[in-house]
Amino acid sequence: MELKGKVVLIISPQSWEGQFVSKHHYALQLAKRGNDVYFLNPPVKKSTTKIEPTAYAKLNVISHSFWFNRKLRFHFRTLYDFLVKYHVKKVVEKIGGIDVVWSFEPNLYKSLNWFNADLKIYHPVDFIDEKKQIGLGKTSDFNFTVAENILEKFYFKNPPSFFINHGLPDLFYNEIEFNIKNAKSIKFAYVGNLMIRGLDKQNIIKIIVQNPTIQFDFYGSYSNEKGDDFITFLENETNATLKGIKSSSELAVLLRKYTGFLLCYNPILELNSGSNSHKILEYLSFGKVIIANKILQYENYRDLIQMSLREDNTDYVHLFNATISKINEYNSEELFTKRRTLAFENTYAKQITRIEKIISEKYNED
């Protein structure tokens, strides 16, 4: 089955406005393929159901609200499901019917059958553990996810479930010439929310303190309104800079100047247990060294990613310092090319092609 010329409803737990993540990029790619794409925002308070065009051709956003109290989901699930099913029917009627429902939302809708689509896809990209989150996969035609530890949750064989890696946005499909920087001018960047529980702040502090000649720049949301110790530290260190939130288009240019990149989560505390991260592909697209916590999905790419061997990150500082001591080796032209090749093999366009192939092969079997 080709995903072209279809009416596709993308169900997202994040709204269209804001930082683009996987749901947004799949919507963009599906629209580019000639599908009429509708991006269903999470419900908000006091909003009529309305469909509005975006700046992208064939891509519309649906704003809506539940006219009943959403807290019913936690106290009267049967009544909540009955009301949501009716609400879904009205949303689909407003669109005029859909061919494909593609849901990244694991919590709000009990069944994808409610959307009355010819093809139903469930695509959780964050860890799921609750019975209802997993059970939603039984109502799809295909389940896709970004990590093996999520895939294992789909214990049933029908419908089938498959691994599809995170994708690389078009903006990061870049033309960059190899250029090795003098080791005396080393800059590292971190991209991501600085307030999340799973961030390994203590090890980040240690590498900054132990490497005063290295510049560390942090891109992402943060707040110091309540006197956050980690943010205060970054504000006061001469070799650390808080850059704030930048758009994907800005990052695609800004990140070219760095010697390498940081991924420093504590897998024990991080939401996805260090299984995978969408940032890895973006980092790889620039070809420079990545110093990371243990990432289960990239265990076979330790030549391209300098990765902790431990679940608790206790070797992270040593790993960083050892990598810096041989920075030109880790940023060789050969590794630069290999990293970029791996990134470009995982663009969102190619992930959709892989999904098409899986669907077509399954339908041919039947």
Image: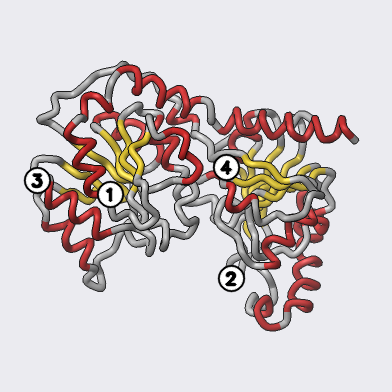
Q: Amino acid at mark 4?
A: Thr
Asked whether, in this view, residue 44 is left or right of residue 341, the answer is right
Local secondary structure at mark 4: loop
Q: Nearer the viewer, mark 3 or mark 2?
A: 3
Verify CB contact (< 8 Å) between mark 4 and mark 2: no
The picture places residue 269, in percent across and down from the top left corner, at 41, 63
Q: Report the side of 78 relative to 226 (left or right).
A: right
| Tag 2 residue | 45
Q: Quadrant of residue 81?
A: bottom right
The mark closer to the camera, 2 or 1, is 1
Marks 1 and 3: CB-CB under 8 Å?
Answer: no
94 left or right of 74? Answer: right
Q: Residues within 10 Å of mark 1 (few under 14, many from 20)?
A: many
Give the residue number, with chain letter if any, for mark 3: 212
Question: Which numbered disc, 1 or 4, marks the residue that appears first in the sequence?
Answer: 4
Which badge, 3 or 2, is on the more N-terminal residue? 2
User: Residue 366 at x, y = what percent?
Assistant: 90, 36
Q: Position of residue 329 (x, y in %)?
A: 24, 24
What's the amino acid at mark 1?
A: Tyr
Q: Which residue is mark 4?
A: 54
> What residue type is disc 3 on?
Pro
For residue 40, say whether it is visible: no
